[in-house]
Image: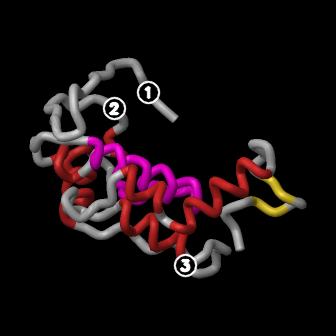
């Protein structure tokens, strides 16, 4: 996953950037508020992408950019519908990634240390990179 049309290498993990380029649907609340963003903004975008992959809907939708920014900053994303067969752990992970406050959002290092993520990464490696195991997708119940 990546869009390297315009990119910036941060010199350290504590450095922040100020430019806003990319898909508006995945903009983190801090970017919407013209605040500096860090890798936690990428965690937000990952949450948006995961939500969209699970629901086939964007977590925040609006008819115009101003409305979208308002929803990203002020509103909570709709829960993943209960009729979709995803685990509580995956739903919780997405909720954590879509935390409005970047200080409360997990870092990438914290995400990869989560038991559910470790288990799924191990399953992926054991399946030799296949996303299917015996006809079931890895992230479904």
Which segment is the magenta one?
A: 39-61
Residue 65 x %, y %: 25, 44
Drawn side of residue 57 relative to residue 139, left or right: left
Residue at the image position 41 percent from the left and 71 percent from the top: 78
**Nearest to viewer (mark 2 / mark 3):** 3
Q: Which mark is residue 26?
A: none
Q: Secondary structure at mark 2?
A: loop
Against 110, residue 66 (above or below) is above
Q: Residue furthest top?
A: 5
Distance between the alpha carbons at the discs numbered 2 and 1: 8 Å
Residue 112 x %, y %: 48, 55
Distance between the alpha carbons at the discs numbered 2 and 3: 30 Å
Residue at the image position 19 percent from the left and 43 percent from the top: 31
Q: Secondary structure at mark 3?
A: helix
Marks 2/1 in contact by CB < 8 Å: the verdict is yes
Q: Quadrant of residue 74?
A: bottom left
Residue 34 x %, y %: 10, 41
Marks 1/3 in contact by CB < 8 Å: the verdict is no
Q: Check disc 3 and report the residue beneath it.
A: 88
Q: Quadrant of residue 116?
A: bottom right
Q: Check disc 1 and report the residue beneath it.
A: 3
Q: Which mark is residue 22?
A: 2
Q: Is residue 42 magenta?
A: yes
């Amino acid at each position: 996953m990546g869009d390297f049309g315009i990119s910036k290498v941060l010199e350290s993990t504590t450095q922040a950037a100020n430019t806003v380029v990319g898909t508006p649907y995945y903009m983190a609340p801090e970017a919407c508020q013209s605040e500096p963003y860090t890798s936690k903004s990428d965690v937000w975008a990952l949450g948006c992408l995961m939500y969209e992959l699970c629901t086939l809907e964007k977590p925040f939708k609006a008819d115009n950019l101003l409305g979208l920014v308002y929803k990203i900053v002020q509103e909570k994303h709709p829960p993943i519908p209960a009729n979709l067969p995803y685990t509580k752990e995956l739903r919780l992970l997405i909720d954590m990634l879509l935390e409005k406050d970047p200080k409360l959002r997990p870092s990438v290092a914290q995400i990869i240390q989560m038991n559910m993520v470790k288990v799924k990464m191990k399953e992926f490696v054991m399946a030799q990179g296949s996303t299917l195991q015996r006809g079931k997708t890895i992230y479904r119940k």
